[in-house]
Image: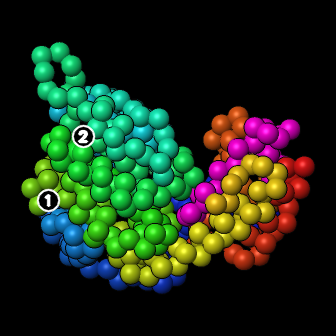
């Protein structure tokens, strides 16, 4: 088996840098269940301010951050609308239904082409029988849709639709930093559009752990209680918050490099008809192998022989994700050998 030269499976694979570890080692800490961790306070205040909201709460994972926000917005037995490939409904082990009693209805996935009028038509008012719609969730950028960025005017139109209907608007912003870098939209402009966001420090920004729920002071106070109920109350988590602060302050602008590398990979694979480079805006490159003679597992195995790790998402779908722990040499190697793997 060849030595691993480059790992494209996920941008969660990054390891804390020496400078980040130094920040963690020297962090001031306290017990966060007592709400006494000064470094967490600093992180939460900084994230809230960056998104133009009153408050934020640290959570151990993106899944917990999303599910807390959604459970607060949707009473049991009532409804969340999102797209069919949204992480909140597809990749969180059924948490919305299993833990929150949330009923979900989806529109067909097409993040960049999301149609607010379709969502408006789906919203159901309260009544005697029908399940009332309480929240709409979008994903920015969209993981399963190849890191697609929802354009700002679309989000603004969706905000108008949800405001008119009196429905909560949530953003799964695990990679909202990538959208901010790709489209140049300030984080607070995104932030003010949503009633709640979840944002992640360990997907592309290089921190080892942590997401935050962002919203009003009242919502975040409720989120703190629900986090505790779910077992997410942490003690000296300032060690993790220090890594998060380091990530926020140092690792956002460099995402442009990950986006350029993703585009380079897509351009190298495009002649095989597996990806349209024009659709690659951020750090995720999905390869649709349906027009080739190789399937996902065989592609991944052949890439592995060349020291390259990729994720298999379906029989004919693989995914490459760029991140800060990759090197120019690794990318050069992939650009050289992966097109040959496709034959
Ligand atoms: C868009 C999106 N949202 C939420 C999550 C969940 O994050 P976690 O793995 O920290 O629970 C992920 C994880 O990859 C994701 O890609």
Q: Residue at x 36, y 37 (%)?
A: 118
Residue 161 falls in image quadrant? top left
Residue 126, position in %: x, y?
Answer: 14, 26
Residue 298 falls in image quadrant? top right
Judged left or right of residue 236, residue 278 is right
Judged left or right of residue 247, residue 127 is left
Q: Residue at x 22, y 45 (%)?
A: 162
Here the colouring is rainbow
Up the image or down, 333 lies above or below 219; here it is: below
| Secondary element at tag 1 | loop
Say whether residue 283 is magenta.
Answer: yes
Q: In front: 49, or 186?
A: 186
Residue 202 falls in image quadrant? bottom left
Residue 206, position in %: x, y?
Answer: 49, 70
Reading the image, the residue beneath label 2 is: 135
Residue 150, position in %: x, y?
Answer: 43, 56
Residue 165 seen in the current view: yes
Reading the image, the residue beneath label 1 is: 216
Judged left or right of residue 220, residue 39 is right
Q: CA gap, disc 1 to disc 2?
A: 16 Å
The residue stretch that appears in magenta: 279-303
| Secondary element at tag 2 | strand
């Amino acid at each position: 088996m060849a030595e691993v030269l480059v790992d494209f499976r996920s941008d969660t694979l990054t390891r804390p840098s020496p400078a980040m570890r130094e920040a963690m080692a020297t962090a001031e800490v306290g017990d966060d269940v007592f709400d006494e961790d000064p470094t967490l306070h600093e992180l939460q205040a900084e994230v809230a301010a960056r998104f133009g909201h009153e408050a934020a709460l640290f959570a151990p994972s993106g899944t917990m951050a999303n599910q807390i926000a959604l459970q607060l917005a949707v009473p049991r037995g009532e409804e969340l609308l999102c797209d069919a490939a949204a992480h909140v409904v597809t990749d969180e082990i059924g948490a919305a239904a299993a833990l929150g009693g949330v009923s979900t209805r989806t529109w067909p996935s097409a993040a960049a082409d999301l149609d607010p009028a379709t969502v408006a038509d789906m919203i159901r008012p309260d009544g005697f029988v029908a399940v009332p719609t309480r929240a709409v969730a979008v994903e920015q950028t969209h993981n399963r849709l190849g890191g697609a960025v929802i354009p700002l005017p679309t989000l603004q139109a969706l905000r108008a639709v949800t405001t008119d209907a009196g429905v909560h608007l949530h953003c799964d912003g695990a990679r909202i930093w990538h959208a901010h870098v790709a489209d140049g939209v300030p984080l607070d402009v995104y932030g003010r559009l949503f009633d709640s966001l979840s944002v992640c420090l360990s997907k592309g920004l290089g921190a080892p752990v942590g997401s935050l729920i962002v919203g009003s002071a009242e919502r975040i106070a409720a989120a703190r209680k629900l986090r505790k109920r779910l077992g997410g109350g942490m003690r000296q988590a300032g060690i993790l918050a220090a890594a998060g602060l380091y990530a926020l302050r140092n690792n956002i602008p460099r995402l442009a490099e990950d986006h350029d590398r993703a585009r380079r990979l897509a351009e190298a694979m495009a002649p095989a008809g597996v990806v349209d480079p024009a659709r690659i805006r951020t750090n995720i490159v999905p390869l649709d192998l349906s027009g080739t003679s190789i399937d996902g597992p065989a592609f991944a195995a052949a890439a592995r022989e060349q020291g390259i790790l990729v994720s298999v998402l379906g029989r004919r779908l693989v995914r490459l994700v760029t991140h800060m722990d990759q090197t120019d040499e690794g990318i050069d190697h992939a650009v050289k050998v992966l097109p040959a793997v496709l034959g």
